[in-house]
Image: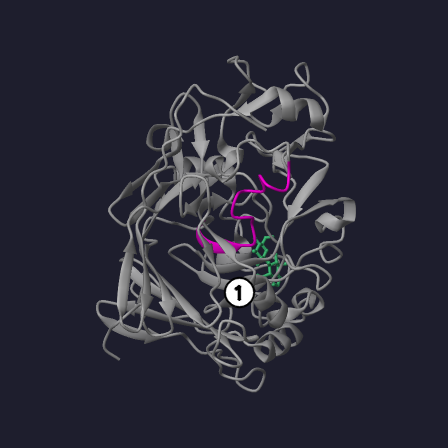
Amino acid sequence: QQVGNYTAETHPKLPWQECTRSGCTTKSNASITLDSNWRWVHITGNYTNCYTGNAWNTSICTSGASCTSKCALEGANYASTYGITTSGDALTLKFVTKGENTNIGSRVYLMESDTKYQMFNPLNKEFTFDVDVSQLPCGLNGALYFVQMDADGGMAKSSGNKAGAKYGTGYCDSQCPRDIKYINGEANVEGWNPSPNDTNAGVGGFGACCAEMDIWEANSVSTAYTPHPCKTTNDGGLQRCSGQECNTPDRYGGLCDPDGCDFNSYRMGDRTFYGKGLTVDTSKKMTVVTQFITDNNSTTGTLVEIRRLYVQDGKVIPNSKVNFPGLLDPVDSITQKFCDDGKKAFGDQPSFQNQGGLAHMGRSLAKGHTLVLSIWDDHGANMLWLDSSYPTDVDANKPGIARGTCATDSGKPTDVESSAANAQVIFSNIKFGDIGSTYSGTP
Ligand code: IDC
């Protein structure tokens, strides 16, 4: 995992604010970096691709070690190639960008310096941002989330990784993705199979697992926030998996919890809360506040609750309440009881519980997480788990099946990549700090 020198890597600036009860300070030198998977990988000192589309060029190298030493990651043209721009404290991620090639979606990380990710421990703190989801139709997901990556992208741990956080290396999440081209600084070329239904991705022999806290997965139709812990026998940081460890073929037999414990207002029974023209109106910008409550109101406590509220047009809007009278309590936040009751009532797999639940998610967050911002479509499930009825072969009136108003045949990547090519998400005004310090509004 060498570094190329054809294009200088210049990180777009993205200032954010850190707040205490006495006020906020602006981190004006903060910036973002593009994930390494989206970057050009070529022979060091040569324009020949090591990887094109969805496949490694096996005439150049076939082993992890040789692709690692022969191939380099390049700097990125953020706006022209990837449709990624910043302006003041706002980040715009465009869905389809037609340059020399066609780029689909993107994933970027917040940086503290040119070579280090910004790390967050959100326990006993709140995380707040503004988002415009008005240009995100069915099948798309504008996501903002935490994953337990290393601050240096894994450079210190892996001698093969010469690129580090500057080039967006070291990604992992709770799906244990196997489409990652380099894991622990080593090329994932052995056993790589091009995806049959994705011209830009493939699946290698290894996957990259780590704990994940989805603060925001949303489009203009539905939204969810979801903790996803990993095995209690590890601390939640990156683990390279192979075979069944990577959540496949048994989705629930791997190192991390792929489903999570999700709070999706529509799925939890309030169908008039979130959407265009609804209580939280997705046709215009909104502020999203997420609070991480611990049992002793300190950063070292046990995570016991994740709360959500919105601010729009100067008004504070409490989260929707669970609305399944007689089946579930009318709560408005994620607690271990909400997860236990919900999984039982909906008949869902208890993988969240089996991987240690909310307390173990908290232990992971305490180690520090990286902030990810992305726009994506879903080659696995067409985003139906977020915005439609899912699984599609079960009666949509059964509690837990309906998640949003999108059709069950919507969200196919081939459809949305042409019909919604101009889709985008805008994240702005990121604030992090003491509970109650990052937002204001009238009740
Ligand atoms: C969701 C995860 C999300 C992931 C998606 C696709 O929360 O992060 O991207 O799967 O893998 C199910 C589905 C399962 C859902 C989960 C929550 O089988 O795919 O997880 N859920 O909606 N059935 C009930 C709940």
Q: Residue furthest bottom?
A: 326
Image height of 34 relative to 346, above or below: above
Q: Quadrant of the C terminus?
A: bottom left
Q: Position of residue 254 (x, y in %)?
A: 73, 54
- Nearest the viewer among 191 and 230 is 230
Residue 154 among those drawn in magenta: yes
Q: Position of residue 50 (x, y in %)?
A: 59, 20
Q: Position of residue 172 (x, y in %)?
A: 59, 47
In what element is the residue under mark 1?
loop
Q: Quadrant of residue 62?
A: top right
Q: Quadrant of residue 255?
A: bottom right
Residue lying at 65% horizontally and 41% vertically, measured from the top left: 178
Image height of 290 relative to 419, above or below: below
Q: Quadrant of residue 203?
A: top right
Residue lying at 39% horizontally and 49% vertically, measured from the top left: 137
Residue 83 among those drawn in magenta: no
Q: Is residue 278 visible?
A: no
Q: Quadrant of the N terminus?
A: top right
Magenta-colored span: 141-158
- The quadrant of the picture showing ligand 1 is bottom right
Q: In the picture provided, is 296 more to the left or to the right than 160? A: left
Residue lying at 48% horizontally and 57% vertically, measured from the top left: 387
Magenta residues: mostly which secondary structure?
Answer: loop
Image height of 124 relative to 355, above or below: below
Residue lying at 64% horizontally and 19% vertically, measured from the top left: 57
Q: Is residue 147 visible?
A: yes
- What colour scheme was applied to this rendering of the protein? one colour
Q: In the picture provided, is 274 more to the left or to the right than 52? A: left
- Nearest the viewer among 209 and 97 is 209
The residue where tag 1 is placed is: 402
Image height of 260 relative to 117, above or below: below
Amino acid carrying label 1: it is Ala
